[in-house]
Amino acid sequence: MSLVVPAVLASSQKDFEEKLALFARLPSISRIQIDAVDGHFAAPASWPYTTDAELSGMVGRGDMLPELHRLEYEIDLMCFDAERAAGDWLALGASRLTFHAESVPDLSRLIASLRKRYGGGADLALTSLVSFGLALNIASPTALIEPYLADIEYVQFMGIARIGVQGEAFDRRVLEKIRTFRARHPDIAVQVDGGVSLQTAKELLRLGVSSLVIGSAILRAADPSAAVAAFEMLENPSAA
């Protein structure tokens, strides 16, 4: 699993395409996360929720996400219509879907529906070409997702209190949540989204986090490629 996962939070289709093009040019990147924020579960709304029908239009034309031969796309569904929206993103070539536990009124029903539609059997994460994860907000207890860990591939801990916005300050409460979770569930992959900097990344890696979802620390860097390389060096210091 990729250590550095750039996050795309787009204001328009043009912005979306430009950010994807930027990350696609970075040879070390193998996975990109696309944030889909509906403006209700989290705010403000991001593309495609800022413009009606553009996403469905792409699906109707048979468009695909770029560089699918080497890039894996993960959709962070920060929205109340996540299950419905997932179908459009999968049609565009996404292969990883992150559902926010707090956005779903019935996680049991969601997991059962995903298993039926995409999982191909009882072992959802193993039998499907689609990987599923659950995201958890800072204020939510891990007990909310623990009954479903056998049905997902990864857990995404949000590292900021206000989700759906890039550049927010890291919330250190997530460190203890991860520490406790890893002690109970050492075999499930953990990623963190929000507030990741070079300093916070060091702490997260020491806790066993396997993927860092990073937005502003890459996009606001003078040299995005060098910024990615600096994060990757944390995983393998001997490569310096």
Image (cartoon, rainbow, N blue to C red):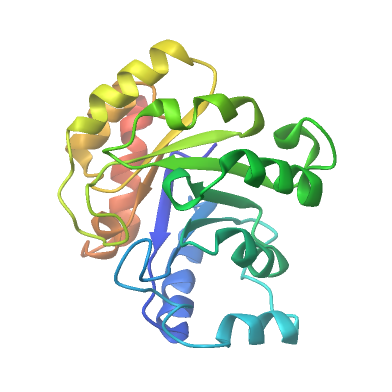
For the N terminus, give its image quadrant. top right
For the C terminus, give its image quadrant. top left
Q: Is residue 138 above or below residue 32?
A: above
Q: Residue at x 39, y 22 (%)?
A: 208
Q: Is residue 125 above or below residue 64?
A: above
Judge left or right: residue 67 versus residue 102: right
Q: Quadrant of residue 163?
A: bottom left
Nearer to the camera, 204 or 36? 36
Q: Residue at x 22, y 64 (%)?
A: 220
The percent position of residue 144, horizontal first and vertical second, equals 44, 32
Q: Residue 210: in sight, yes or no?
A: no
Q: How many marks?
A: 0
Give the residue furthest to the top. 183
The percent position of residue 228, horizontal first and vertical second, equals 34, 50
Judge left or right: residue 224 versus residue 136: left
Q: Residue at x 57, y 41 (%)?
A: 107
